[in-house]
Amino acid sequence: MKSLISSPYTHGDSSLQQVMLQVVFALIPAIGIHFWFFGWGIITNILLATLFCLGFEAIVMWLRRRPIQTTLFDGSALVTAVLLAITIPPLSPWWLILVGSLAAIVFAKQIYGGLGFNPFNPAMIGFVVLLISFPKEMTQWVAPIANGEQGIGLMQSLQIVFGSTGLDALTGATPLDALKTGIRMGGEVSGVMAATPIYGQFAGFGWESVNLAILAGGLWMLWRKTIRWHVPVAMLGSLAAISTLFYLIDPSRYADPIFHLLGGGAILGAFFIATDPVSGATSTKGRIIFGIGIGLFTYIIRSWGGYPDGVAFGILLMNMAAPMIDYYTQPKVFGQKG
Amino acid sequence: MNSVNRKLWKYNGGLHLEDHKTCSNQMESRELPMPKRLTIPMQQHIGEAAHPIVKVGDKVLKGEMIAESSARVSAPIHAPTSGTIVEIAPMPMPHPAALDAVTIILESDGLDQWCELHPIENYRHVSSDELRDRIRDAGIVGLGGAGFPSYIKLDPGQHFAIETLILNGAECEPYITCDDRLMRERPEAILDGARIMRHALHAKRCIIAIEDNKPEAFAALERAQSQSGQADIELVLVPTLYPTGGERQLIKVLTGKEVPSQGRTLDIGIISHNVTTAATIADAVIDGIPLINRMITVTGESITTPQNIRAPIGAPIEALLDFAGRENGVETQLVMGGPMMGISLNSASLPVIKTSNCFMLQPKQPTVPESPCIRCGECAVVCPAELLPQQLYWHSRAREFEKVQDYNLFDCIECGCCSYVCPSNIPLVHYYRFAKTEVWAQEREKEAANIARMRHEHRQARQEKAELEKQERMRKKKAALKDKEKGGTDDAAKKAAIKAAMDRAKAKREANQNPEAAAPTDVPSQEAAATETQPATIPESTSKSES
């Protein structure tokens, strides 16, 4: 290694693997809550996605004649797998996860040169490819388990995932989706929310708890300095600002800011995906602009676009802009401020 | 004056490092017994190497000048003890690239006999110029590690008024404690040095800055100041944070001012020197003693008793290591300087030089492979120069040297904070050094090309001028000839002779012109022939290359 011939000769205790594992650890509470409300689906998703993502990573590294082991255990493919698994509906068929993992690891990450060289967030590419290719599978979610109800058992879950049992009877639309359809059919926000049992305290039964757990994980990462505050604060701040603005203009057609923050993928996107440093902006000012952009795109797509949620598209659109943002937001260096 | 209520500023980033100072700063410094042979390189400073002024076989006394240089940025070198010059030859020196330098080998005679010294009785009655000359002649360079000739930094010129003289006793690098020990053991010398420099600079005020992990050093200076009966120097404790000892960082902390990027400290009316340099200047001025030895920290996990050692310039490093005791049995790595900015040396037989502030002997670290950069930006968070190290790395790696300069490569102080925090373990500073060297090489090439171009242009101009002069001479000659003709002299015979000669020449010219006139008609046909034959040869050659 070069540092033996050139200073510094000492190194802090951070490592790539540690950074990646902290992201996974931060998701554990959310996975637990998810399991509580939606059953085994999240577990099968994660296991399958991990298997496929690591498998694809290993195959590509073998094809590229690069060291398989160090790359496989740097944790980056694991993070992609877990994030992808959380965005895919629970109890999705195995092939859906396979296609998503292929898109994420092979097309979004390795074709560009692997970790550090991918312009787009791999998990989001995987998710968007699935959303566009399989809209039906991607928008049907298992209904949350209400108090006292019996969820789907492990064996039945496996049967669903591997294709011998149908799922249709058990699923419904996501809160964002239902709201969008409701409004499009001429309903008002309050009416739609009252008519459908999926809405909980503020954003969707089950969903809001999962999102609060994701928020807790995100705050833990901030405290551990695994991520910095700029992107999440800017993104959630701009989403809150624009949704408040439209809510004040016409509360019958636009949902309130709490619903926007907690009802979809905003928290996950803000803390776990938009903070992906590889595909995001890197300067401090750049990160704030990057986050604001995602928040605005998220709202625009949610409110007037064709898809129920806009977080993934917002992130990918801003990923594209990141190099330019970085170029125009270079900080003034020491001694150039005067 | 003390620092309790003083306002201090902050610079971006920096690191709270484990300082590892107590292992070496508890013990009184010790004097290394004079080694039998001293190996004295002629390049121990920034600038031109010094040239030996002694010959093999010469006997020299302690403190006698043995090498000097007429260049401005250079420093003379003195004999650290009395003895005989036994060899002058290029030898390896402590340098990151293990370069050779002309080196004088001095064999000690064991007498340690001083040459005649010339103390300056009262520096206050002496001009700035004289003080600077004395400091230059004493071979004093920046002893904090930079090695820039000190007298130049005491010569701001007429256009700069020096507001503040800062003595840097921050010593922010982990492990190093030589400044700490010197401040504790010789605070009076440091204060004297400060006053001499202040006098030479006509500086309005003088600050000595010490990181707050050295309270004993601060107390010693405070005590010395109160004993001296003068309260003219401000002693300031600054928060311990690496790299506060960086010149620009320390100035920011103390004054809130930023030295302009690519500028010098005197642009903002500040000059800074290291505290050990100050003590050495006091010795040179008050006692006439040149720079022939220094305080060195010998430390690291592979040293039995880490401590500070006063050693002569030229002593073999291994003598110091053995004096402090080496742990046996492990493979070690030797570093000159601290763990953050030091240079690794591949041999302990290299000599102590003026800028050797610390030798660190550590067990060899296992190599950790470099992972890809994930642009996490932690490097930018800690960068005291407020650069974007991740972008510098990206462009250095791609050899895009113009882009690297756009990202202010040359504002990098190579403190190593970025490499230290990098989760991917990328030796970032190494990439920046590489990029800097490449840019310098390109600049040198450009310079060489410029010189070549200028020489060519000068040559052309010279030739044109010569041609014009020739024509002018011809014209004058012709005019003179005409004048003569007009004058109508009587010697017609001469005239006739000239005319005959001209006629002869004319005939000859005409005879010569005919074959020349025939030639141009030939040329086009030759060309046509050439162009005709060419198409035939081309397919041949391509077919050859295909086969």
Image (cartoon, coloured by chain):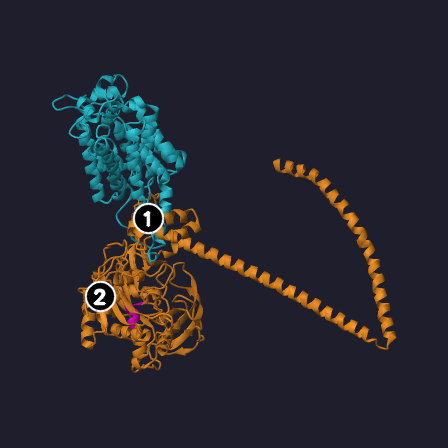
> Which segment is the magenta one?
B271-279
Q: Residue furthest left?
A: A148
Q: Distance between the residues labelled 2 and 1?
A: 41 Å
Rendered colour, chain A: cyan
Please indicate whether residue A143 sits to the left or right of residue A293 in the image. Answer: left
> Residue B180 placed where, x, y %?
24, 66
Q: Position of residue B110 (x, y in %)?
A: 33, 76
Secondary structure of the residue carrying numbered label 2: strand
- Give the crowd class for mark 2: few <14, some 14-19, many >=20 residues within 10 Å: many
- The lab-note entry on whether marks 2 and 1 share a chain reads yes
Which quarter of the figure has residue B322?
Answer: bottom left
Residue B371 seen anywhere in this rendered image of the structure = yes
Kind of residue sitting beneath label 2: Val
Q: How many marks?
A: 2
Residue B236's tag is 2
Residue A59 in view of the camera? no
Q: Which chain is represented by orange in the image?
A: B
Q: Quadrant of residue B100?
A: bottom left
Q: Mark 1 points at which residue?
A: B367
Q: Does the magenta stretch include residue B275?
A: yes
Percent coordinates x, y for residue B32 in the rendering = 28, 70
Residue mark closest to the camera, 2 vs 1? 2
Mark 2 — on which chain does it sit?
Answer: B
> Which element type, helix, strand or loop, lies under badge 1?
loop
Instruction: Indicate whether A124 appears above or below B274.
Output: above
Q: Mark 1 lies on which chain?
A: B
Q: Residue A128 in the image: x percent, y percent?
A: 33, 29
Question: Label 1 crowding class (10 Å Cα cut-off): few <14, some 14-19, many 20+?
Answer: few
